Image (spheres, rainbow, N blue to C red):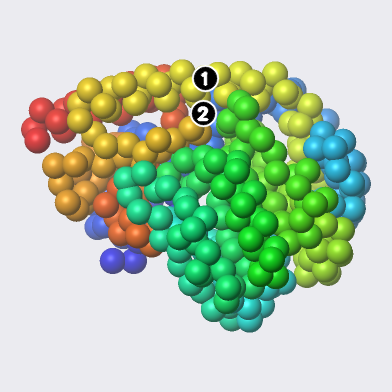
């Protein structure tokens, strides 16, 4: 079956399965902030409209300065992009023809972008259900690698890897002349996340990618940034299309970064709802990953394959993210975003109905 490669846009999923999209449904496949965009963004929207006749700053100076100040790094170490997807594509172009290791399961765009740029791909597979990352098990693959893609916190499991493990990997990769591309798209959903951006001054092989669309619920605007040593930024910038970030996205990014209170509110909400959901799942004997962010993997341990469970949920108007295109998962887990209290309660109601039947 030709499964859709991303969450969201549920009409494509239903079409691929030969099902009709129900009139009422809840999309748990898109893992953005359930609180929606910051209120300040709506309040300023009319002001933004006045700027659409103005060409965007091709150097994104204001936004870069704000990020550099917040992260206590140089503006020459920051590159603004049209969402994380564009930044992944730029890195893949930078690595054209190289040997790349992807720690799996992970975001499918790494492999897709690298294959489009003639890279040789090797998987390092983490094993379910704990998906533990071991430097000793990873070491043999690094000797022949030019780059390593690592997503932390991980998508799709939601697991955060220990800081000491990540640092050890970066150190070992440096010895092997291997770049580490650390995707931190969901770092800001963690209250006490230790940023790795300060390490770009110590490790010249470290490239960090961050998305701004997840926390601030602005995937339609497309915005993210990359942090690395200035020479890497200088090599990546010519690979980027001119005018790739629009004016409204740049203005929205500046405004969003000022909303620390909004980020704190989100982190508290996600933590409370995740605890409520996980308590229910464990009570009703569903297996979940030890996620620390705004999404998680779930499966019914009574089934080897989850397809009948998946179809049941879809017909009930509950749309999780399939995992058929995550190497190592092969569809045997479903990924759910944490949504509003009402939507999460509806999910629990439908899961209870499934459990009563099975």
Residue 76 rendering spot, x and y as whole percentages = 89, 53
Front-most of 229 and 4? 229
**Eyeballing the image, is 273 above or below 105?**
above
Number of callouts: 2
Mark 2 — residue? 34
**Quarter holding residue 327:** bottom left
Classify residue 238 as left or right of residue 319: right
- The reply to whether callout 2 and callout 1 are in contact (CB within 8 Å) is yes
Residue 201 rendering spot, x and y as whole percentages = 83, 50
> Which quadrant is the N terminus positioned in?
bottom left
Mark carried by residue 269: 1
> Residue drawn 70% across and 52% down?
208
Q: Is residue 166 visible?
A: yes
Residue 20 rendering spot, x and y as whole percentages = 27, 49
Classify residue 118 as left or right of residue 248: left
Classify residue 21 as left or right of residue 165: left
Q: Is residue 221 visible?
A: no
Front-most of 14 and 126? 126
Residue 88 rendering spot, x and y as whole percentages = 64, 60
Front-most of 71 and 219? 71
């Amino acid at each position: 079956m030709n499964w859709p490669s991303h969450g969201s846009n549920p009409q494509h999923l239903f079409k691929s399965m030969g099902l009709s999209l129900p009139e009422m449904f809840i999309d748990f496949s898109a893992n953005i902030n359930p609180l929606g965009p910051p209120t300040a963004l709506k309040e300023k929207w009319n002001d933004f409209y006045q700027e659409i006749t103005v060409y965007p700053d091709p150097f994104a100076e204001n936004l870069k300065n704000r990020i550099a100040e917040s992260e206590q790094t140089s503006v020459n170490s920051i590159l603004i992009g049209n969402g994380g997807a564009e930044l992944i594509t730029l890195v893949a172009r930078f690595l054209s023809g190289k040997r790349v290791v992807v720690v799996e399961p992970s975001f499918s765009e790494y492999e897709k972008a690298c294959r489009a740029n003639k890279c040789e791909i090797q998987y390092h597979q983490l094993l379910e259900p704990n998906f533990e990352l071991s430097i000793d098990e990873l070491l043999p693959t690094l000797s022949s690698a030019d780059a390593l893609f690592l997503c932390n916190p991980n998508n799709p499991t939601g697991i955060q890897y220990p800081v000491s493990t990540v640092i050890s990997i970066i150190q070992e990769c440096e010895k092997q002349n291997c770049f580490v591309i650390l995707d931190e798209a969901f770092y800001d959903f963690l209250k006490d996340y230790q940023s790795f951006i300060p390490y770009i001054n110590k490790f010249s092989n470290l490239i960090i990618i961050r998305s701004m669309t997840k926390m601030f619920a602005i995937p339609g605007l497309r915005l993210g940034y990359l942090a690395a040593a200035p020479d890497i930024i200088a090599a990546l910038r010519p690979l980027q299309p001119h005018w790739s970030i629009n004016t409204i996205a740049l203005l929205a990014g500046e405004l969003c970064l000022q909303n620390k209170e909004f980020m704190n509110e989100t982190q508290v909400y996600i933590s409370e709802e995740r605890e409520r959901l996980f308590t229910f799942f464990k009570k009703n004997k569903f297996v979940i990953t030890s996620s620390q962010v705004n999404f998680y993997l779930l499966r019914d341990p009574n089934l080897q394959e989850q397809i009948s469970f998946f179809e049941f949920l879809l017909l009930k108007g509950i749309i999780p993210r399939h995992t058929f295109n995550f190497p190592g998962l092969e569809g045997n887990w479903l990924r759910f975003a944490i949504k509003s209290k009402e939507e999460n309660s509806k999910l629990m109601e439908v899961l209870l109905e499934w459990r009563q039947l099975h």
